[in-house]
Image (spheres, helix red, strand yellow):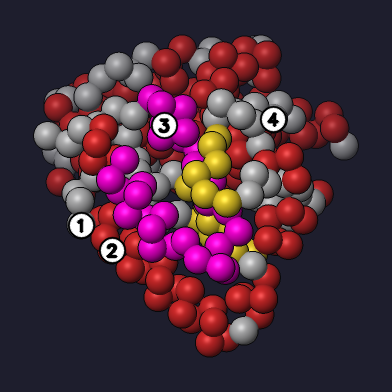
């Protein structure tokens, strides 16, 4: 069974590999940064690495950097913890047109932490195009979720279909509240999004998004999964109408 020490080991393994003259900063976000790790459930390497711009301008140096990052990711992945690769940016890139969706988390103390190098959080910036892209991400997620609605009519789910439903519901409870808030112009941190929803979409019933947060989806029956999926799809349709109406009012 994984423990907190495994997460600390993964972090040390990563920073030991990526450290070097080209590394400007390593920043953490998520459960590691907040000291809220749930061993075996929390992702490891919710992080972004900032490197010098000169390295990215030179093709050979950039290739060597990628090789170093691959070594770091392979080492951490081998520990068997829930894992995804870290982000990386050039210094000018992250200070000029940082992805807007991440700014509320990555700029704020308590939600992020400097693990190595410079503290760049107060200098992070973005562009109007990135802001628009972040606000439009809600619609892309809606298309993804609503595309699974047809599975509600299946009497028997294949393992692949069951996997798709569980994945969609997991992502829904994790990111859908944030995407709704951002689409409505409420730039909050992910952990604040659910509490902000009544303000962002006051006429929508958001109860379906909170009704299954405590459940282990992998252990649910076909009927239970379909019931939750149906509720979430209907809720998403209502949210889509509300958010779309907000955009039309802005015009």
User: Which residues, given as a range, are shown in magenta?
Assistant: 8-36
Quarter of the image where one finds residue 95: bottom right
How far is the residue under mark 3 from the one under mark 2?
Answer: 21 Å
Q: Is mark 2 on a helix, strand or loop?
A: helix
Mark 3 vs mark 4: which is more N-terminal?
3
Q: Residue at x 24, y 45 (%)?
A: 81
Residue identifier under label 3: 31
The reply to whether residue 129 is visible in this rendering is: no
Q: Which corner quadrant holds the C terminus?
A: top right
Q: Which of marks 4 and 2 is nearer the N terminus?
A: 2
* Image marks 3 and 4: residues in contact by CB distance under 8 Å: no
Report the Cα–Cα distance between label 2 and label 1: 6 Å
Whether residue 45 is visible to the viewer of this picture, yes or no, is yes
Q: Which quadrant of the figure contains the N terminus?
A: top left
Residue 127 colored in magenta in the image: no
Asked if disc 3 and disc 1 are in contact, CB closer than 8 Å, the reply is no
The numbered mark, 3 or 2, whose residue comes first in the sequence reads: 3
Q: In which quarter of the image is residue 153?
A: top left
Do the residues under discs 1 and 4 have CB atoms within 8 angstroms?
A: no
**CB contact under 8 Å: marks 3 and 2:** no
As measured in the structure, the alpha-carbon distance from the residue carrying label 4 to the one carrying label 2 is 34 Å
Which label was assigned to residue 187?
A: 4
Mark pair 1, 4: CA separation: 36 Å
- At x 66%, y 37%, the residue is 107
Q: Mark 2 points at which residue?
A: 74
Provide the secondary structure element on which disc 4 rests.
loop
- Residue 136 pos. (x, y %): 66, 44
Q: Are marks 2 and 1 in contact (CB under 8 Å)?
A: yes
Q: Give the mark toward the camera: 4 or 2.
A: 2
């Amino acid at each position: 069974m994984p423990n907190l020490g495994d997460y600390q080991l993964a972090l040390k393994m990563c920073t030991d590999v990526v450290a070097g003259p080209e590394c400007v900063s390593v920043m953490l976000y998520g459960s590691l940064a907040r000291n809220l790790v749930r061993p075996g459930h929390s992702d490891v390497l919710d992080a972004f690495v900032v490197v010098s711009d000169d390295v990215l301008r030179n093709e050979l140096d950039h290739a060597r950097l990628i090789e170093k990052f691959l070594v770091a990711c392979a080492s951490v992945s081998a520990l068997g913890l829930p894992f995804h690769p870290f982000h990386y940016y050039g210094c000018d890139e992250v200070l000029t047109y940082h992805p807007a969706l991440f700014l509320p988390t990555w700029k704020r103390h308590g939600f992020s932490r400097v693990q190595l190098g410079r503290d760049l959080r107060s200098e992070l910036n973005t562009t109007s195009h990135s802001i628009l892209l972040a606000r439009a991400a809600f619609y892309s997620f809606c298309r993804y979720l609503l595309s699974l609605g047809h599975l509600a009519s299946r009497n028997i789910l294949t393992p692949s279909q069951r996997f798709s439903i569980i994945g969609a519901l997991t992502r829904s409870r994790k990111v859908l509240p944030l995407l709704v808030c951002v689409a409505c112009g409420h730039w909050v941190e992910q952990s604040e999004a659910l509490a902000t929803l009544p303000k962002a979409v006051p006429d929508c019933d958001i109860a379906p998004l909170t009704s299954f947060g405590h459940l282990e989806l992998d252990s649910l029956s076909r009927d239970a999964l379909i019931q939750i999926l149906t509720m979430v799809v209907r809720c998403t349709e209502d949210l889509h109408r509300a958010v779309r109406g907000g955009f039309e009012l802005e015009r």
